[in-house]
Amino acid sequence: MRIVFVGPPGAGKGTQSKWLLGYLGIPHLSTGDMLRQAYNDGTRLGRLAHQYIVKGQLVPDAIVLEIVGERLERPECDNGALFDGFPRTAGQARALDEFLLERGKPLDAVLEMRVDEQQLIERLTNRGRDDDRPEIVHQRFEIYRRKTEPILKYYQQRGLLFTIDANKPQDEVSNQIKRIVDAIRAATATQQATELDD
Ligand code: B4P
């Protein structure tokens, strides 16, 4: 299964990914984690990316796509992946589509995590990362509205978009996600059985 989590900073993409990975048995591609790891490893791309992250800006597509592309080529991603915080721009969405369609493995679902801005600020203040200071969070939220929200329409038109009320406590959010994922799995199994019968 190939699933994308989209949502503003602090929506709970990373939090919900943790259990969903085990549930679906697929690898986790969190671009935030990958970029932070690259910085901690002292790589050239990691150092470049860090300059944007601390200012609350999106890392340029070229850097993100290089890091994600390398991971996607690995055999572990052949049978599915959970994309956490990627794509975040129209350019990234197009690049992901091209990559997956060339391999005949399109996305199964895009899960939009929707949360009120005030709730996000409270969550991020408690998390306390360098890029979680209120003035930086406002900027990240604004960039989300401008650059990331437009890709939701693109996925909606293709019937891939599911919206999650992520204001709710974590276990309620997990239940909403589980219901959607289970329904998609059941529909895929039915479709495969029909194809075998034909
Ligand atoms: P990310 O690492 O993706 O981080 P995020 O959007 O801030 O957080 P996430 O939604 O995962 O929140 P979490 O579960 O941790 O991005 C960081 C930066 O990297 C970006 O700003 C950007 O600069 C760069 N970047 C990443 N991907 C990129 C891309 N594709 N293109 C360009 N740049 C990119 O939850 C946050 C907190 O809320 C936690 O403390 C959690 O415990 C709490 N929480 C979660 N769910 C909750 C709930 N239901 N109720 C109460 N609290 C909850």
Image (cartoon, rainbow, N blue to C red):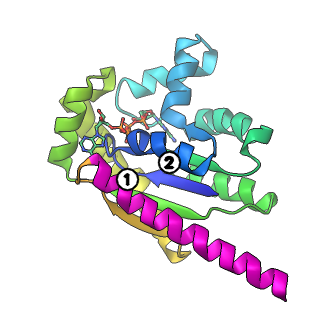
Residue 164, picture quadrant: bottom left
Start-end of magenta stretch:
170-198
Residue placed at 70% from the left, 79% from the top? 191
Q: Nearer the viewer, residue 197 or 134?
A: 197
For disc 2, the marked residue is 20
Q: Which of 50 and 83 is in front in this view?
A: 83
Name which residue type carries label 1: Ser
Image spot of residue 85 (x, y percent)? 48, 44
Identify the secondary structure beneath mark 2: helix
Residue 176, picture quadrant: bottom left
Residue placed at 29% from the left, 55% from the top? 172
Magenta span includes 180? yes
Is the CB atom of the residue marked by disc 2 within 8 angstroms of ligand 1's nearest atom?
Answer: no
Mark 2–mark 1 distance (CA, rounded to whole Å): 8 Å
**Which quadrant holds the N terminus?**
bottom right
Note whether 109 is above or below 19 in the view shown: below
Identify the secondary structure beneath mark 1: helix
Image spot of residue 71 (x, y percent)? 70, 35
Q: In this view, does 77 lie to the left or right of 35?
A: right
* N-terminal-most mark, 2 or 1: 2
Magenta span includes 77? no
Image spot of residue 14 (x, y percent)? 42, 39
- Marks 2,1: beta carbons within 8 A: yes
Image spot of residue 4 (x, y percent)? 53, 54
Q: Main secondary structure of the magenta part?
A: helix
Name which residue type carries label 2: Leu
For disc 1, the marked residue is 174
Quarter for ligand 1? top left
